[in-house]
Image (tube, rainbow, N blue to C red):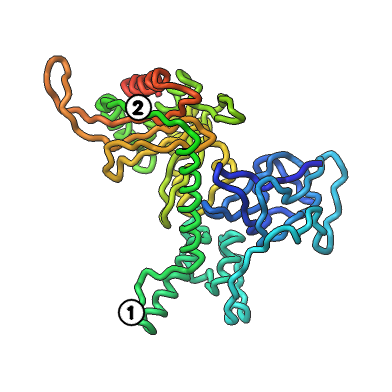
């Protein structure tokens, strides 16, 4: 017998709201199966099962706010007898009265009178629920998720467009950027969560910063030759070279791939890069690229594209938010030449890359233009110091001079 708990999806999370169950009593589950959808400050996240078993009972109803660590469901061992599927809602072991139901928007009467048939649409349970709340017919919405699936964001954007059109005809003075109150509130909550986490990091972590300039000519020349032999959809971006070099360099200085927990350094055996991705609606999230040091560049590129697409479509899994062991951020596309980030606890380091720029360099006693990138490291002085950080940045530089070995 084991409990399926509300996971902690980041240092800034204290509670989440259960949106929908993907399993019911009597279902068999395997580790990694999607059990439920949970709404957090970072968006709606798919929560995975942490162990194999059979769902014995669901302890929390959708729409309930649940603190981190509280049981959501109960699993029994698969070898035991499967519990019968109840014909009525199960009585939760944890009193629901102690939990706070999330207030729901009233559903327009038109939507109530004419329920939408979604049997042939690819739409997540949370998006279906949001459509009912906002009175949006999903059949009129173009899905932007994986395989054309309709997401909560698609529903909210459709509602925003409808609201904008309606208000522009009745109130010409109303600005055209009107959004549903809940969408605005979500963005505010995300900014507040980011601010809380970064305030804690600045308060608790004694940061030190290092930077180095890396010659990217060898890497970019090799990348150009590689992409000549690839299809357009299979081409590599130079950013994937930076990610792979970072992951491999952590073998040289493994104490940067670690957590600071209970006043001690806990080095992690696996290298899961948290890649900072800007969300379309505002805010930032850094899900994990798992085992980045062991992936080929092609696999890493494919997984990176998929991760970015799911961040912006609202399809992340809980393991991708809870597993990062170090964060990598790059503002090169926005024109910043260097970025000095704030470490996300309990991690002990953050690696930053700026944009690639042309700089005059001395090569073979001649002054030439070379493409260079500024790499930075924010380190936790409780875990490492500038000497070890410098060794790490030198390893990243060395690896990028031999991209064919990545």
The residue most toward the top is 364
- Residue drawn at (30%, 26%) of the image: 212
Q: Sequence order check: which comes first, mark 1 or mark 2?
A: 1
Residue 173: numbered disc: 1
The residue to which callout 2 is attached is 210
The residue most toward the bottom is 170
- Residue drawn at (37%, 20%) of the image: 390
Specify whether 244 is left or right of 1: left
Within 10 Å of disc 2 (Cα), the crowding (few <14, some 14-19, many 20+) is some
Q: Nearer the viewer, residue 379 or 77?
A: 379
> In x, y percent, where is residue 62?
68, 60
- Residue drawn at (63%, 56%) of the image: 17
Q: Quadrant of the C terminus?
A: top left
> In x, y percent, where is residue 297?
42, 31
The residue most toward the left is 366
Specify whether 266 is left or right of 356: right
Specify whether 80 is left or right of 140: right
Within 10 Å of disc 1 (Cα), the crowding (few <14, some 14-19, many 20+) is few
Question: What element does badge 1 sit on?
Answer: loop
Q: Nearer the viewer, residue 404 or 113?
A: 113
> In x, y percent, where is residue 122?
56, 60
Q: CA distance from mark 1 to mark 2?
A: 51 Å
- Residue drawn at (52%, 58%) of the image: 149
Quadrant housing residue 50: top right
């Amino acid at each position: 017998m084991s409990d399926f708990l509300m996971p902690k999806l980041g240092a800034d999370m204290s509670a989440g709201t259960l949106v929908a169950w993907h399993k019911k009593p009597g279902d068999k589950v395997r580790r990694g199966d999607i059990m439920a959808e949970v709404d957090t400050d970072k968006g709606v996240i798919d929560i995975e099962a942490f162990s194999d078993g059979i769902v014995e009972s669901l302890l929390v109803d959708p729409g309930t706010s649940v603190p981190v660590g509280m049981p959501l469901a109960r699993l029994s061992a698969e070898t035991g007898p499967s519990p019968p599927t109840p014909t009525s809602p199960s009585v939760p072991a944890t009193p629901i009265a102690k939990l706070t139901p999330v207030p729901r928007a009233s559903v327009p009467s038109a939507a109530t009178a004419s329920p939408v048939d979604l049997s042939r649409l690819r739409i997540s349970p949370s998006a279906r629920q949001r459509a009912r709340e906002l009175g949006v017919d999903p059949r009129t919405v173009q899905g932007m998720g994986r395989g054309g699936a309709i997401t909560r964001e698609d529903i909210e954007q459709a509602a925003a467009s409808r609201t904008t059109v309606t208000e522009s005809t009745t109130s010409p003075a109303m600005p055209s950027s009107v959004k549903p109150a809940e969408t605005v509130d979500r963005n505010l909550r995300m900014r507040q969560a980011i601010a809380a986490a970064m305030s804690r990091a600045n308060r608790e972590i004694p940061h030190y910063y290092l930077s180095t300039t890396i010659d990217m000519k060898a890497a970019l020349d090799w990348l150009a030759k590689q992409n000549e032999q690839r299809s357009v959809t299979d081409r590599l971006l130079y950013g994937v070279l930076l990610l792979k070099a970072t992951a491999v360099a952590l073998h040289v200085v493994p104490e940067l791939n670690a957590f600071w927990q209970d006043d001690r350094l806990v080095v992690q055996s696996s290298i899961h890069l948290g890649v900072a991705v800007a969300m379309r609606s505002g805010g930032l999230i850094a899900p994990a690229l798992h085992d980045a040091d062991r992936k080929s560049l092609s696999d890493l590129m494919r997984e990176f594209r998929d991760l970015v697409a799911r961040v912006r479509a609202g399809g992340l899994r809980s393991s991708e938010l809870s597993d990062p062991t170090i964060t990598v951020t790059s503002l090169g596309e926005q024109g910043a030449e260097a970025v000095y980030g704030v470490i996300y606890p309990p991690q002990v380091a953050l690696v930053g890359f700026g944009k690639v720029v042309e700089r005059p360099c001395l090569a073979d006693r001649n002054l030439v233009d070379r493409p260079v990138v500024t790499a930075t490291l924010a380190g936790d002085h409780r875990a490492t110091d500038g000497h070890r950080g410098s060794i790490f940045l030198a390893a990243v530089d060395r690896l990028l001079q031999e991209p064919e070995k990545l």
